[in-house]
Image (cartoon, rainbow, N blue to C red):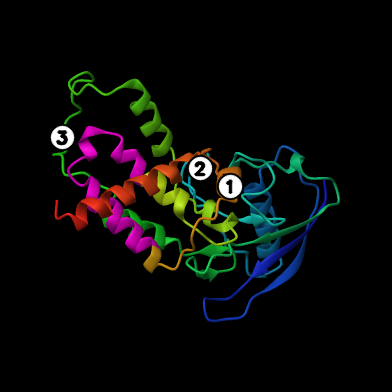
Amino acid sequence: MNFRLRIWRQKDRQSRGKLLVYEARDISPNTSFLEMLDIVNENLLARGDEPIAFDSDCREGICGTCSLTINGEAHGPDHPAAVCELYMRKFRDGETIVVEPFRVRSFPIIKDLVIDRSALDRIVQAGGFISARAGSAPEANSIPIPKHDADLSMDAAACIGCGACAAACPNASAMLFTAAKVSHLSLLPQGNPERVTRVLKMVQVMDAEGFGNCTNTYECEAVCPAEISASFIAKLNREYARARLRASAGD
């Protein structure tokens, strides 16, 4: 398979970027998108040109670092999946593919397709933890937790923090990410000691980082590689309202 690639190139955060055209030839349909970029970079290096900078780590859909916008879609056209799980058979032979970084003001471009997503880390650092003493794993049944709550908590904990929700949202909202992190712990008894302060601090940092508000377009849910449900945003809103009420009452 042969492809015409229009890839965003930008030297650094201060420089102006632009889309440049590259050819990817004789690509197997079973090649992953990141492997295809590896092949393009090998050809660039062979010609003495600078390779395209892009992020990757696990290449198993776990780490979330391979965040790219492909033909206008966060993580590309094969949902639910991260870019590393996208294969070239998903595209037509001879197709032109536009590859860009996530377009979110809170994710400044470092170089080419590499973005700084530390804003998400700062949201987690504001309250995404528990005060329970770490140690060996407790006996599974020592803290009774209803199965429904345990399942919901696990669903929320599946978030890989890739930022696709913000990239797909017309408001660049990080509500789905923040909702997943808040809901994961608020559903468990271990998360109760910081339940009020957690949601207040995390939402405060989310707003301070410049993310927009949720207006229920559900684009976040559509592109999430972990299939996090937008219903967690409703839970975040309930948690936040409850926390504000308790904080105002001096509890």
Residue at 27% across, 33% down:
188
Categorize mark 2 by other alpha carbons within 10 Å: few (<14), some (14-19), many (20+): many
Instruction: Looking at the picture, tell me which residue is in the foreground, 145 or 117.
Output: 145
- Residue stretch rendered in magenta on the structure: 182-206
For the residues bearing labels 1 and 2, Cβ distance under 8 angstroms: yes
Q: How many marks?
A: 3
* Foreground disc of the pair 2, 3: 2
Q: Which label sits on residue 135? A: 3
Of pointers 3 and 1, the one earlier in the residue sequence: 3
Q: Which label sits on residue 230? A: 2
Dot 2 amino acid type: Ala
Residue at 59% across, 40% down:
81
> Which residue corresponds to mark 1?
218
Q: CA distance from mark 3 to mark 1?
A: 39 Å
Residue 200's spot in the image, x, y percent? 28, 56
In the rendered view, does 164 fall on the left or right side of 203? right
